[in-house]
Image (tube, grey):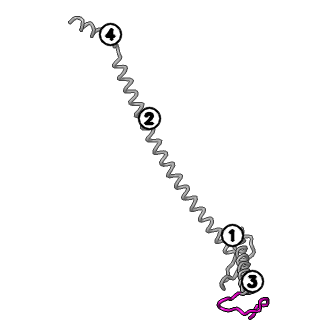
């Protein structure tokens, strides 16, 4: 078929002689692409209504690849799967919080034991200090007298 503008038929070496030849060759592909985009948009809108519906959507059947799909049932199953996923997430979060609480309790118990041991050591040092300084002046005076009398 010859081009209306340049009047030349397409050849294997030069399939397009002018911009009009190229546009004419691409035009059917553009129409196919536009129809695919429109179909994709319609399916996206249907899926969005299924995902965002609260079970209030009227029953509608969608045919995809020859299979009939009930949108109300899809919406219910989507909500169920979403709730199950949230439940699993909450259980795992609860488990992590419980583990952290257990870890903190063990740490607090270890710190309590350490504080109790430090108090015991301090009271022992105070007791040793008191016994060492008990009547130190009298003992030092006796020691001094015994040294002088030798």
Frontmost residue, 63 versus 56: 63
Residue located 61% across and 68% down the image: 81
Frontmost residue, 113 versus 18: 18
Q: CA distance from mark 3 to mark 4?
A: 122 Å
Quarter of the rendering occupied by the N terminus: bottom right
Q: Which residues are magenta?
A: 1-16
Q: Is residue 100 above or below residue 129?
A: below
Label disc, if present, on residue 115 of the rendered structure: 2
- Image position, residue 84 (x, y; %): 59, 65
Q: CA distance from mark 1 to mark 3?
A: 46 Å
Residue that numbered label 3 is attached to: 19
Q: Earlier in the sequence, mark 4 or mark 1?
A: 1
Q: Earlier in the sequence, mark 2 or mark 3?
A: 3
Q: Residues within 10 Å of mark 1 (few under 14, many from 20)?
A: some
35 vs 135, left or right, is right
Q: Earlier in the sequence, mark 2 or mark 4?
A: 2
Residue 102 in the magenta stretch? The answer is no
Q: CA distance from mark 2 to mark 3?
A: 89 Å
- Image position, residue 142 (x, y; %): 28, 9
Tell me the mark number nearer the camera, choosing from 1 and 3: 3
Residue that numbered label 1 is attached to: 51
Tell me the mark number nearer the camera, choosing from 2 and 3: 3
Circle 2/circle 4 CB separation < 8 Å = no
Residue located 52% across and 55% down the image: 95
Q: CA distance from mark 4 to mark 1?
A: 94 Å
Residue located 47% across and 48% down the image: 103
Residue that numbered label 4 is attached to: 138
């Amino acid at each position: 078929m010859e081009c209306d503008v340049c009047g030349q038929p397409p050849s294997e070496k030069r399939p397009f002689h002018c911009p009009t030849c190229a546009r004419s060759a691409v035009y059917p592909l553009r129409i196919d692409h536009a129809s695919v985009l429109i179909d994709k948009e319609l399916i996206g809108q249907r899926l969005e209504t299924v995902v965002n519906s609260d079970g209030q959507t009227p029953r509608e059947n969608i045919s995809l690849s020859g299979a009939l799909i009930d949108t109300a049932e899809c919406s219910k199953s989507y909500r169920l799967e979403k709730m199950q996923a949230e439940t699993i997430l909450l259980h795992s979060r609860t488990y992590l919080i419980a583990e952290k609480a257990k870890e903190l309790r063990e740490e607090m118990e270890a710190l309590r034991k350490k504080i109790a041991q430090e108090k015991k050591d301090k009271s022992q040092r105070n007791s040793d200090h008191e016994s060492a300084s008990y009547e130190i002046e009298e003992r030092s005076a006796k020691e001094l007298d015994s040294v002088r009398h030798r």
